Image: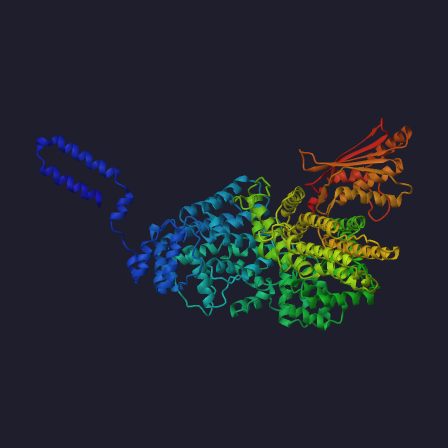
Amino acid sequence: MLHLSLIHITKQVFIRVSYSDKLLKVSLLYGVLHMINTIDNSFIRSVVPKTRTRSTIQVQDIKSKKARNLVRGIDPSSHRSTKKALEKIKHNCKYSDYKKALQYIKTSPIFDNNDIGQLFNEHCPKGMPSLVEFSPREITFQIDCYSSKLLEISEKAEDIVKYLKDNDLISALNACNEMVDLKGTSIFLIRMLSYITNRYNLLSYEDNEVLSKIDFLKSKIQLSKCSFVEEAVTQLSNLRTSHLAICKRINDFSGTFPYGYIAKSFIKPIPQDSKEFDQTLSAFYSFSLFDAFLYFKMIISQDLPFLTKLEIKDELSSAYEKITCIDFLPDTMYESIDESSGYYYLRECFLFVEQPKALEFLTIHGYYYSDFSNNYSSISHVKNLIDRYFLGLNSLNQLKCSNFNEVHINWDKYESSTCGMLENSTALIHLLTKKQGHLDEEEQLLFVKLMSFSRDVGQICHPDYLLSIANSAKDNQLKLVTQCLITINKNSQYNEHQLRSTIQNYCINEFNSDLIELLKYLYDVSPAVAEHLLQACNETFLCTLFLLVEKPVDALQLRADMLHWFGEKTDDERYIDRAKTLRIDIQINKERGTIDDSRIYVDPLKFTQWFEDNMVSKLTMALDNLIIGSQFVKLDWSKKNASLGTSEEIIDSILNCYKEFCENKVFGIASYLGRRIRHGTFKGTAITEVKNLPKKEEYQHLFEDKDFKNKFDEWMLQYESMIEDLVKTHLQIKSKRKPHGLITTSIDSPIKNTAADQLIIEILNIYSKRSGVIRLPSLITDCCWKLVDYDLTRTKKLLSEMKSSHGVFSYTPKNYSNKFRRQYSKFTQEVNSITGQKFGLMASWFNKPNYASPSTDIYLLFNVVVSEVKDSVSNFNPVIDLDDRNFSVNGGTYYVIYDALYVLVHNTARHGKSDGKILFSVSKPEDRNAIKINLMSEVDSYEALNHAKEQIEKGLKITDNDDDAHIIEGKSGLKKLRKLEKEGSISNISFMTDEENTMLCFEFYFELSSRGKYNDIDS
């Protein structure tokens, strides 16, 4: 229009200018053409009136003048300004004006790049903090108005699904990119990216182009802006996370944040009522119109009785059908179908929930396979689906109770002959729910066996049904099994008491008080039941079995025996590892003299619960990003929150875990300090007996001496002041308010740095395994104990110093007979004896508990080995020369060093001088993540040196039929070293002789980042 107007004006000028002014005409024509060619199109758009569509909201459509002015005052590029203005409209104007203002922002091109989000977006919107509810009619109106745009995006969605059906990831990613260019950024797109990531990981792709395209798209759509959705999608579909824990977190979300409703629909796709449908539809609408279109069509197709039937254009319905008619087949999704595939499929169903088979599978199995506390009352539609799927299933004897040889994903009906673990589990819960936990005698016996052919029953079954089974159980093993299951998800003091009572009575009456025999019996009945018992009977729990276990050290020994037996029975090295470590811990604690002391305490169950509720999603997302991006981990523990890199996110997560471990007032060290220290126990222990000593009849007359009384009162005042200062100032978690607290929540020492670095190495080693996430809480708990152990040692050192400086009373009487002098001396000795005992006791409160993380100083470990060898080799009493330093060995695998040292020290005892020198040293090479261990032993003579050399070199050549290095008793051969080297646990074994000093010289490396064959336990 503007171009034509300019041409018309030029023509009129040409007519009015005379022929003689030809030059002027040419110049004028040139100028007009230049104007036409250089006109700014955006200027044209701003001056030419738009054709108004029936879906476009204009500012003048907002009735409230105040609301209109607030909208006009918004900075379109500022999310904060927009959100602030909308909040003012919401609170000061009618809700209808608020909705129109938001609709204007979502449709006006002026707000194209605003983070509130439009109907169609190139990047992820941040949205509004609270849900804005639009009616289904309002949303379907917009769907019809923008049908052309939706059809374009739907075609790309269809292409993506087609490519993914055949695992053509590159083509699918290219189609995703084209979808973004069409402003098709959506929840659908995020789900597809997660699906592609899973296929890349599960199907062992090695094409880095896939990873780079995924990263490019995540950056292009600015996925981090909607971190809530990103975390929900990533964690729910991450096969290494605890699905039930993630579901519980999402279900427990009670805010009105729109993306919370979206996340809940991933778990429970079918709405409970019309209100839930309206809210979820509005939530999807807040992200993109395309998502609202998909959700609307998916739910409307279910013919739910409480929904008003609304129609959209036929071409849109046809486009939706094209997307949904393509099925992702499990045979293509996974390398093979086994008993776990159904569980993995369930976790991924929400990624392609538009497909009817996936929707039904998620609806049926997701109903039962969820945290029991969030089971919703089934509407008739869901109930009909469940009843149809489990039609004819009436008894537990119809369930799968044998090996899963031939497995399929059964969409239409439960089939015991081909079902997997998930389907068998939901079928079991279906029957228990149907029967309300009332089983006949045959079913009660079968229930125990079914534990080996089902999963997570303790978490997904309502405790009332399990309690009903336990109360009616006539069989002890059934009672034991059900009570183990109950304590998994409802670990109250009462339930734990019931479990203790059952275990002890069963064990005493049937197995002669032998818990190992009970474990063996249960394993024959059901390996899963035996594993349940093993998990329940940790060191802390065993200490409470007073009828079976007399002392804490007995609990450790019993736990080690149980783990070792189960590890050998199942051929699982992890259990054997833990057993060996516990046994070495017993020897180490004997060496330290701390085996039966009371300990500082952190509730491991509650800490694990906190971790799963608050940290697992953040940490696993950071680890996934690290692994997918093949990034280098740079560990700088001093730079918390320094930047937004993946390494920093991992560091922040670990530091947050350690902070909670220390500061939590319910289950952390702070709660222990509160109970044990600040609530009077510490002061009472330190002061009461000393203060009451003068009241003893035998000492009362001494206090008639004013000089003595004043001296003691003055000392007592200083002593009490010192105790008060310890309690208020030092025995605290360090903070701004308590700057001198001895327990710090930062990585502030080389020892802590080493432990934290090692934790990252171990996390990365296990995380790629499917069970890696399950093991994260215990791994992090172990590390937290290693970190705090440094502060506990400092605390005990301070207590020792305070005892020496303030806890010693002395008095020299003047001009008294020897009798009185002896009485003064006796009183003084008794005071000092009491303070010594009390400070020793209080120091023991800061010992790391026996159940906590296995870690030790390597020099202490060497002393333990020497003590063990002394017990088995007579006359062995060497002179030990150690480096004057410490080196902590972490991670529960130091039994490898123990085994190697036992071999060397034992051979030193056999071939060396019985009272000769042994030099032992440890160093850390700069060029590798390992420690270098050197041991030198003196020999009697040159002849003995040659004989020892011959025997040792012969022993080191033997590589077949390797023996284990025994920990409890017996001997170990040199071939054990070669076995450890072969496994990768140690490396570079070397042996030589020092003829000048007649010494045997051994050297080997212990790899800190490698567990040898144990790396593949979870593969």
Q: Nearer the viewer, residue 639 or 229?
A: 639
**Chosen colour scheme:** rainbow
Q: Nearer the viewer, residue 176 or 114?
A: 114
The reply, left or right, for residue 608 in relation to residue 554 is left
User: Residue drawn 31% across and 54% down?
Assistant: 72
Q: Quadrant of residue 997?
A: top right
Q: Nearer the viewer, residue 477 or 913?
A: 913
User: Residue drawn 53% across and 67% down?
Assistant: 382
Can residue 465 be spotted in the picture? yes
Q: Nearer the viewer, residue 394 or 1005?
A: 1005
Figure check: 203 above or below 610: above
In the image, farthest residue toward the front: 815
| Residue 335 image position (x, y, % from top left) | 61, 48
| Residue 933 image position (x, y, % from top left) | 76, 36
| Residue 384 image position (x, y, % from top left) | 54, 68
Figure check: 854 above or below 212: below
User: Residue drawn 83% across and 49% down?
Assistant: 968
Can residue 393 be spotted in the picture? no
Figure check: 224 above or below 927: below
Q: How many marks?
A: 0
| Residue 333 image position (x, y, % from top left) | 57, 50
The reply, left or right, for residue 292 in relation to residue 702 is left
The reply, left or right, for residue 650 in relation to residue 229 is right
